[in-house]
Amino acid sequence: MTFSFLCRASKASKNGLCPIEFSININGERKYVTTNRKAKPFSFNPRTQKVYNDNETTDYWAALRAKLYAQN
């Protein structure tokens, strides 16, 4: 099982914010869940899966990831 976050630039709103989606792979099947967070596409780093200058969002994702690992 793997988890990752991604910024969907194709779903950007008029103000330029993109929804951050959570991707989970279980036994070769990938599912996407939209989180309640948005970011500018250029401020999201896909390699580190963090948003620049937004520690609150990064902490939220860390807590979410910890909950998912704890359930497994």
Image (cartoon, grey):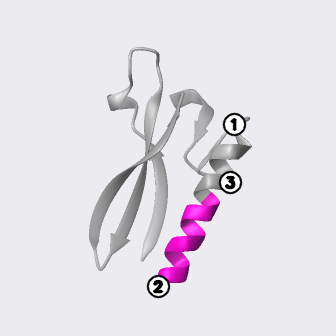
Q: Is residue 63 magenta?
A: yes
Q: Amino acid at mark 3?
A: Asp
Residue that mark 1 sits on: 52
* Residue extending farthest left: 29
Residue that mark 2 sits on: 72
What residue do we see at 29% from left, 61% from top?
A: 31
Q: Residues within 10 Å of mark 2 (few under 14, many from 20)?
A: few
Is residue 43 depicted above or below 47 in this figure?
above
Which tag is nearer the camera, tag 1 or tag 2?
A: 2
User: Magenta stretch?
Assistant: 62-72
Q: Amino acid at mark 1?
A: Tyr
What residue do we see at 74% from left, 35% from top?
A: 53
Q: Residues within 10 Å of mark 1 (few under 14, many from 20)?
A: some
Residue 15 at what x, y percent from top left? 46, 15
Q: Is residue 46 magenta?
A: no
Quarter occupied by the N terminus? bottom left
Q: Amino acid at mark 2?
A: Asn
Q: Dividing the picture into quarters, in which one does residue 19 lie? A: top left
Q: Dividing the picture into quarters, in which one does residue 32 lie? A: bottom left
Which residue occupies the foreground of this view, 6 or 61?
61
The Cα atoms of the two marked residues, 1 and 2, are separated by 29 Å
* Residue extending farthest bottom: 72
Prevailing secondary structure class for the magenta stretch in the rendered image: helix
Which residue occupies the foreground of this view, 3 or 34?
34
Is residue 69 depicted above or below 49 in this figure?
below
Give the left or right position of residue 28, taking residue 18 as reference: left
